[in-house]
Each structure stands twice: as structure tokens, then as C-alpha cells.
């Protein structure tokens, strides 16, 4: 073991302390702005704050907090012209989303005013600076939807917007939000665009990794799948012997051996190192990317043995600089940080959605990673929030959300419901039929998470381009 450590330090890096950020499950989405905006001037985008009631459901509580939002009025046609609101979710809002993308095109075509709102407890919209479990009690979607209602009502009181029609656009969790908003506050908005919304909460979300498996099978064929399958089977086998463990530590570029090869949580985190990378590749896949990964497996680019191929793929696609520190306590530390988007979102998974990407039991390549269990993900709830947040608590919490919003049977008008078949989240959305006559579903083959929110990309398939145009056409029809 001593020799191996020397070997890793000597060959991997000259850094004194490796500082690779911890690997996190793809529970939280960061909504990257359209890439072409990275070098654009932001002079048309302004940022400000609005005072917001902390508790919309208790008139006796008059506390407030400052909610951040951004706006761009470059296309605004004056009183009566529409307002487009991009709804923020579990991330920091960024100016880029008001400089390009499909909502930007809608605003351009309809002389719209553009707004981007930040969700409470994320980015700079923080009612408390210390996210203790107690202080997180005002973090839930009911309050966040009421923030939006209050925000829109506030805008409508200005003569500029008194006669404006409001459109909401949201992706990922924010897609749930816009759909649920239209359902709950139909009088405030004429329509919404919901991109990749996992509108049904689910604790044991095996469907996620099933889609990841299916996407690699469809793009890389049986050969690719059998390489991944063998690599994962060899890994699970290697966990059982001392010799195997040393091979595994090298193949996966671990800084040190796992602390305890018999601990289900250490094994859960190690399993996540594997599955969460495949998840990331599929969730963000552009056409051609998965095929390229499979070609690299076949061409021994990542390594020679199946296990080395998996380890090399993870290191290379994640941009590993030094080596991985896979310790469960470090994962817990990420969520114990008193104020972070990661902690706030993990809290919402424990108290509202679950969404835990567990090992499937249906013959996928990920089935052997049995430590990716509900127990593993719920243990994080217990460790970082409260002992009370046990399995029963989380199941009840998710059932409550499905009850109040209708799960896969929402009753909502004028909502465009968009999904991609390579987006693992579509498994928790309605993707096979329209929600209603006036709430169409558009499901696009080979498309990934929130693909339609971007502007035109030269890697778009014809269907992707058509879908963005279709969304713009329907939105324009609501405004006329
Ligand atoms: C946050 O609150 C916790 C619990 O009361 C406390 O232990 C911790 O020191 C606080 N952290 C900060 C940064 O204030
Ligand atoms: C949806 O629209 C139909 C037709 O205009 C209307 O009858 C119905 O009440 C609406 N449903 C909801 C939930 O707003």
C-alpha cells in the first residue's frame, strides 16, 4: 500500500495537496447559460432585488428577504407588450440567459420584456446566511411559487406592465415550477414552457440509470454496452480481494484505498464515482458525444482492460487533475457547508422530491452497483439535516408533493411540455402523450436535458430545431 501511494504521488502530480472537488450525484442541475454568451457584453442586463415576504402562508409573520432578479428591456415594445420570465431553480442566476437562447428569441419576436428570477435560498437570494435545518423551513416549492406570484403581481401594478401578458419558461426543476405555477395561479400567466420537468417525485428512481444504459446502447451498440458491463462487473469482483483492490485503486486513480471496503456508504460513494459520470455524459449529451466515448472504449484510448477503460473514461471526461479522494465523510461535508446551493437542494430532495438515482434491477450495466441504494441517499438526509429525516419521512414527503401537484396527471392549460429521450429525467415526466389539447407534449429523439432552452446549435438535429420553432410558434399564438 505504501509503495502504491508513492507511485501515485510521483506519477500523477507534483502538487502538495490534491484538491479535486468532491464528486456529487447529478441531483442538482446548474443550468449553464448558452455558451455563445460567455464573451458577450452584458450591458443590456440589469440586476436588482425585490423585498419578498418570507412566509406567504402566515399573515402573522411579517419578515422579509431580498430576492434577486435580472432584466433586459432591449426588445420591449412598451405598455401592453408581453413579459417573459425565465424562472430560476436550484442555481445562481446568470446574465447569459437574457442574452441568447430560445426565450430570448421569443422576446425578440414579440417585443417582450425579459426577466430572470432567482429561487429563494439559492445564489444571492438567501433569507438566512446559515442553512441550519431550522432555517431551511421556508425552503419549499409552495413558497417559491408564491414568490413568483407576488413578483408578477408587483410588476402588474406598474402602468408599464398593467396590460402585459406574462409567459414563464423554466427548465429542469424550474420546469416543474412553471407547470405547477400555471396550474395554481392560472390568472397570472397566459402560458408556460416547461423544459425537461421531472414532475413526479420518486424516492427510488431506478429509471434514471435505465435511460443512461439505453442511451449508450442506442449510440454505441452491444459492443459498447458489453465493455461497460464487463468493466463494472470486474470492478465489483475486484472489491472482494486485496489484490483486486490495489488494481482498482490504480484503475480509478484513487488517492488512497477506500477507508473500509465493507462499509456500504463508502461503497455507495465509490459506486457513485462510476455511475454519476455516465449520468453526466448522457444528461448533457450533444449528438455524437456518446458515440465518441464508445469509440474511445473500443480504441483503448482510456485504458486497456475493461476496468481501466472505465477508470480512464471517468478521469478524462471529468478533467481529473490529480487523483480522486473517495471518502463518504467528504461527501457529507459538501452538504454540511452552512450555505450552499448543494445543501439547499439536497434538503429539497429529502423533503419534496427524492429523485435518488439508485441501481436499477432490470439487467442494465449499472445493476451490480447495489450500494447506490435508497439507504445510501437517505443516510445523507439523516446525517446532514436531522435524524428525523429517515426513509419513512422521505417517502411521506414525496407522496405529499405528488398529491398536491398531481404527479403525472397535472390539470394544466397552455403549457408546452418538452422532453428529450436521452434526458434521464424524462422518466419522471409526461413524455408519451399531451397533457391536454392546449398543453402539447413534444418529445425529441436523442435530445438531452433542457436542450430546447439554448439558441440554435450547429449540432442540433432537425427535430431539435423544429421543436424550438414550434415552441416559439405556440407562444406567439398565446400572445395574439
Ligand atoms: C451555523 O449554525 C450552526 C448550528 O447552530 C453552528 O454550529 C455553526 O457554527 C453556524 N455556522 C456559521 C458559519 O455561522
Ligand atoms: C382549461 O381550459 C378549458 C377551456 O378553456 C377550461 O374549461 C378549463 O376550466 C381550464 N382548466 C383549468 C385547470 O384552468
Image (tube, grey):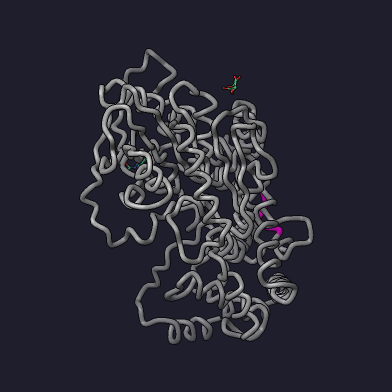
Name the quadrant containing residue 111.
Answer: top left
What residue is at 36 percent from the left and 34 percent from the top?
83
Q: Position of residue 443 (x, y in %)?
A: 63, 49
Q: How many marks?
A: 0
What residue is at 39 percent from the left and 56 percent from the top?
34
Q: Position of residue 349 (x, y in %)?
A: 55, 41
State which image quarter holds ligand 2. top right
- Judged left or right of residue 45, residue 119 is right
Q: Position of residue 469 (x, y in %)?
A: 50, 49
Q: Quadrant of the N terminus?
A: bottom right
Q: Is residue 312 above or below residue 131?
A: below
What residue is at 28 percent from the left and 35 percent from the top?
77
User: Is residue 373 inside the magenta stretch?
Assistant: yes
User: Is residue 433 inside the magenta stretch?
Assistant: no
Q: Is residue 130 visible?
A: no
* Magenta region, main secondary structure: loop
Q: Nearer the viewer, residue 449 or 338?
A: 449
Q: Is residue 55 above or below residue 479?
A: above
Q: Position of residue 70 (x, y in %)?
A: 29, 41
Residue extent of the magenta highlight: 370-374
What residue is at 33 percent from the left and 49 percent from the top?
94
Q: Is residue 239 above or below residue 384?
A: below
Amino acid at each position: 500500500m505504501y509503495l502504491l501511494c508513492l507511485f501515485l504521488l510521483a506519477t500523477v502530480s507534483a502538487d502538495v495537496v490534491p484538491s479535486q472537488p468532491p464528486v456529487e450525484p447529478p441531483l442538482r442541475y446548474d443550468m449553464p447559460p448558452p455558451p455563445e454568451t460567455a464573451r458577450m457584453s452584458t450591458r443590456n442586463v440589469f440586476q436588482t432585488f425585490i423585498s419578498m415576504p418570507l412566509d406567504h402562508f402566515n399573515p402573522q409573520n411579517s419578515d422579509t428577504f431580498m430576492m434577486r432578479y435580472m432584466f433586459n428591456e432591449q426588445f420591449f415594445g412598451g405598455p401592453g407588450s408581453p413579459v417573459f420570465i425565465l424562472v430560476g431553480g436550484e442555481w445562481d442566476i446568470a446574465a447569459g440567459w437574457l442574452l441568447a437562447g430560445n426565450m430570448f428569441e421569443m422576446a425578440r419576436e414579440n417585443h417582450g420584456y425579459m426577466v430572470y428570477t432567482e429561487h429563494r435560498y439559492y445564489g444571492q437570494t438567501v433569507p438566512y446566511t446559515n442553512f441550519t435545518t431550522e432555517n431551511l423551513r421556508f425552503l419549499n416549492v409552495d413558497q417559491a411559487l408564491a414568490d413568483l406570484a407576488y413578483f408578477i403581481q408587483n410588476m402588474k401594478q406598474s402602468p408599464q406592465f398593467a396590460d402585459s401578458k406574462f409567459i414563464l419558461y423554466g427548465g429542469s426543476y424550474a420546469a416543474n415550477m412553471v407547470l405547477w405555477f400555471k396550474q395554481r395561479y392560472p390568472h397570472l400567466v397566459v402560458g408556460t414552457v416547461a423544459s425537461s420537468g421531472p414532475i413526479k417525485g420518486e424516492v427510488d428512481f431506478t429509471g434514471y440509470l435505465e435511460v443512461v444504459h439505453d442511451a449508450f446502447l442506442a449510440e454505441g451498440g452491444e459492443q459498447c454496452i458489453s465493455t461497460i458491463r464487463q468493466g463494472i462487473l470486474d470492478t465489483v469482483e475486484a472489491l472482494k480481494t486485496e489484490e483486486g483492490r490495489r488494481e482498482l485503486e490504480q484503475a480509478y486513480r484513487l488517492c488512497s484505498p477506500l477507508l473500509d471496503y465493507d462499509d456500504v456508504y463508502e461503497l455507495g460513494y465509490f459506486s457513485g464515482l462510476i455511475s454519476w459520470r455516465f449520468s453526466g455524459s448522457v444528461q448533457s449529451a450533444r449528438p455524437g458525444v456518446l458515440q465518441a466515448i464508445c469509440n474511445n472504449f473500443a480504441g483503448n484510448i482510456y485504458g486497456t482492460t475493461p476496468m481501466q477503460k472505465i477508470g480512464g473514461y471517468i478521469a478524462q471526461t471529468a478533467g481529473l487533475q490529480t487523483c480522486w479522494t473517495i471518502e463518504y465523510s467528504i461527501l457529507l461535508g459538501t452538504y454540511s457547508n452552512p450555505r450552499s446551493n448543494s445543501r439547499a437542494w439536497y434538503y429539497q430532495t429529502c423533503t419534496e422530491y427524492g429523485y435518488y438515482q439508485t441501481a436499477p434491477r432490470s439487467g442494465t450495466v449499472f445493476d451490480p452497483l447495489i450500494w447506490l441504494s435508497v439507504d445510501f441517499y437517505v443516510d445523507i438526509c439523516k446525517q446532514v439535516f436531522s435524524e428525523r429525516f429517515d426513509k419513512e419521512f422521505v417517502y411521506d414527503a414525496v407522496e405529499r408533493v405528488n398529491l398536491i401537484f398531481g404527479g403525472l396527471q397535472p390539470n394544466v392549460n397552455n403549457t408546452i411540455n418538452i422532453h428529450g429521450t436521452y434526458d434521464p429525467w424524462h422518466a419522471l415526466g409526461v413524455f408519451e402523450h399531451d397533457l391536454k389539447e392546449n398543453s402539447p407534449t413534444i418529445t425529441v429523439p436523442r435530445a438531452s436535458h433542457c436542450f430546447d432552452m439554448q439558441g440554435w446549435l450547429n449540432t442540433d438535429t432537425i427535430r431539435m430545431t423544429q421543436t424550438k420553432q414550434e415552441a416559439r410558434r405556440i407562444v406567439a399564438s398565446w400572445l395574439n
